[in-house]
Image: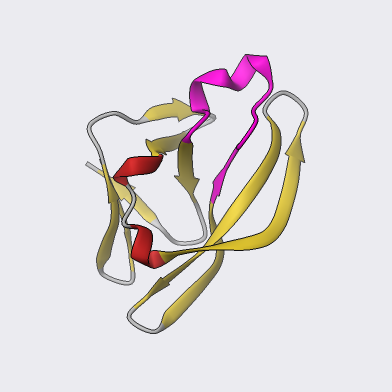
Amino acid sequence: MKAIWNNEIIAESNDTIVVENNHYFPADSIKQEYFKPTDSHTSCVWKGRASYYTVEVNGKENLDAAWYYPEPKPAAEQIKGRIAFWKGVQVTE
């Protein structure tokens, strides 16, 4: 699977986990140079507290376009150390 934004591959892996129709990529499969941590957080009843990255590619920013669960609840343990995308990031084979 590939995550693409602003015509650039920002993550690529053969080992994604699908949860609620989102592909969670292993942390080591993202291209770190495109990711900046933000102070944003949301909460999910069964997954826990999510943290976010802004994706920046070729001078354009996509605020909070990637998220992850640093300490997921037990029911979501399989996505620990993984990152998912939204806000126009295309995930494709």
34 and 64: which one is in front? 34
**In the picture, residue 39 is in which quadrant?**
bottom right
* Horizontal side, residue 75 vs residue 20: left or right: right
On screen, 89 above or below 26? below
Estimate the x, y position of residue 19 in percent, counting from the top left.
Answer: 50, 27
Q: Which residues are magenta?
A: 67-81
* Horizontal side, residue 52 vs residue 73: left or right: left
Residue at (36% x, 55% y) in the render? 90
Is 72 a magenta residue? yes
Estimate the x, y position of residue 11 in percent, counting from the top left.
Answer: 30, 50
Residue at (72% x, 51% y) in the render? 41
Residue at (26% x, 69% y) in the render? 7
On screen, 4 above or below 29? below
Estimate the x, y position of residue 63 in percent, counting from the top left.
Answer: 57, 68
On screen, 74 above or below 4? above
Is 68 a magenta residue? yes
* Horizontal side, residue 37 vs residue 35: left or right: right
Say which quadrant the C terminus sits in. Answer: top left
Residue at (26% x, 66% y) in the render? 8
Say which quadrant the N terminus sits in. Answer: top left
Rendering colour mode: secondary structure
On screen, 42 above or below 55? above
Estimate the x, y position of residue 35 in percent, counting from the top left.
Answer: 44, 62
Residue at the bottom extreme, as displayed: 59
The number of callouts visible is 0
90 and 3: which one is in front? 3
